[in-house]
Image (cartoon, grey):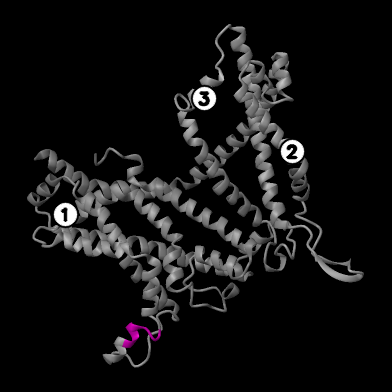
Amino acid sequence: MASAMSQYELLRYGKAKRFGYKFVQFFKSLPRRLLNLLIKLGIIIKNLVFGIGRFCKDVVMTFVRGTWKTRLTYVVMGFGNLAHKQFLRGLLFLAFEAAFIFYMIFAGGYWLSQLPTLGTVKVHTETQIVAGKEVPTTVYGDNSFKILLYGVLTIFFIVALVFTWWLSVKQSRTLDQIDEDKKKIATDKDDLRGLVDANFHRTMLALPLVGMVVFTVIPIIFMILVAFTNFDLNHNPPAGLFTWVGWDNFGQLFTWGGSKFSATFGEILVWTLIWAFFATFTNYFLGMLVALLINKKGIKFKKGWRTILVLTVTIPQFISLLYISKMFGEQGIINKTLSDWGWISSPIYFWKDPTLAKITVIIINIWIGIPYLMLMVTGILMNIPADLYESAKIDGASPLQQYMKITLPYMLFVTGPYLLTSFTGNMNNFNVIYLLTGGGPTNVRLYNSAGQTNLLITWLYATTVSDNQYNLAAVIGIMVFIVVALISMIVYNLLPSNRNEEDLA
């Protein structure tokens, strides 16, 4: 009993104090943390410079000390492997080099040469002779979008070649050393066998790695580069060209008070944070409350209640949210029913009043999120030690005290990482806002009459699709990443489960 009491007392008096202490200490240590971050960035830059220096030194020393086979590999990739009868590796290296040379001669060189200007030849009209008559013909010139995209791909191709070239040289040098030591060199059969044996992890990770680079890394870099151009409706390929504008787009964002775009970003950012807070914690605490009520002793038809809640999850949001949007419209079933009952004399403008629209989407989101939380919390509640509640009852704790001192601290400890991911996910919750309000109601005071329920992600979408201002959309995308990353870093460092994983083990 003493052990159980001590655990209860630890939860009752210790958790909140430790969390509050960490919260205060974290913000007190922010200047030191920022200084350490700058120091670490300096160390990273220094290591990068020294790393490049070491790489250049290794390249020179390997050439000086290597055999003629290794030296020839500097020019003909894979030659060292071919000379040591590793034909499979050698031919792959050689084929990669041949493909690179072919690409650079017939395409890559052109894209790289056009990258500094992003194209100079605009669409124009030329006169051609057709059947003895002069016919004006539209001739498209350079395509800035293709130049930027293929320029980025070419740079990645060059980086891949340098990495593969150095791998070929190192393998040749290693094979020379094995040959000098009179040891057995792996054959092609050994290499093929290793792909499904010792090196199977590399085989399995190769395709996901390529997919991550092609579908994640390159698009992110492309988006970042677009933020430094004037790519918009007036400079839209193939009819128009866009060019580099440096930091001008970011200047619009950070010109507080003097830029409509800047003021709009600030207003939408504040609403995004408010939305993410309420969308996360209303679902969290109400979902927990529903789970506690269903799991309470004496409640009948528990499976039936859970099934009813789960059914709301199975309906696609595209259907349910669009239907709800119509329900709350001026002529929707909600206004009609209230009017028939005599409760209202004129329609309630759920989607035209900014404050009412924001409150409505938060309430509707509760209906969407509670079932997920109920299912998750139900499993966690079953793992709370029963002796904690027994000792709390002996100590005279009321049900509310048991919840505040046992259930809630345990839940926050276990679900802390989920709350963080849920908060960041709600900041990018496109479906709920777009399907219910479309970002509206619009406000002429905001940039391009942006909607007042827009989140940063839906505003980014509207800026791209409706306004065709790809450059400013890229700036918004970068800022969304920075905001989410900063919040995640701060909250993650405050989570008790981050550093004290053994507390509730």
Pointer 3: residues within 10 angstroms few (<14), some, or many (20+)?
A: few
Q: Residues within 10 Å of mark 2 (few under 14, many from 20)?
A: few
Single out the mark in the foreground, 3 or 1: 3
Whether label 2 touches label 1, CB < 8 Å: no
For this view, does 480 lie left or right of residue 470? Answer: left
Residue occupying image coordinates x 66% and y 24%: 78
Residue at image x 70%, y 64%? Answer: 236
- Which of the labelled discs sits on residue 192, or is there none? 3
The answer to which quarter of the image holds residue 328 is: bottom left
Provide residue 442's location: percent of width, then percent of height: 52, 77
Disc 1 residue crowd, few under 14, some 14–19, many 20+, Cα 10 Å: some
Which comes before the other along the chain, label 3 or label 2? 2
Q: At which x and y percent is residue 347? A: 38, 88
The answer, for residue 130, to whether it is visible in the render is yes
Q: Kindly identify which residue carries mark 1.
A: 402
- Residue named by callout 2: 102
Image height check: is 396 above or below 95?
below
Q: CA distance from mark 2 to mark 1?
A: 72 Å
Inspect this view and state whether residue 25 appears. Answer: no
Magenta residues, start to end: 330-336
Sequence order check, earlier mark of 2 and 1: 2
Q: Secondary structure at mark 1?
A: helix
- Answer whether residue 160 is magenta in the image: no
Q: Residue at x 29, y 47 (%)?
A: 414
On screen, 399 above or below 338? above
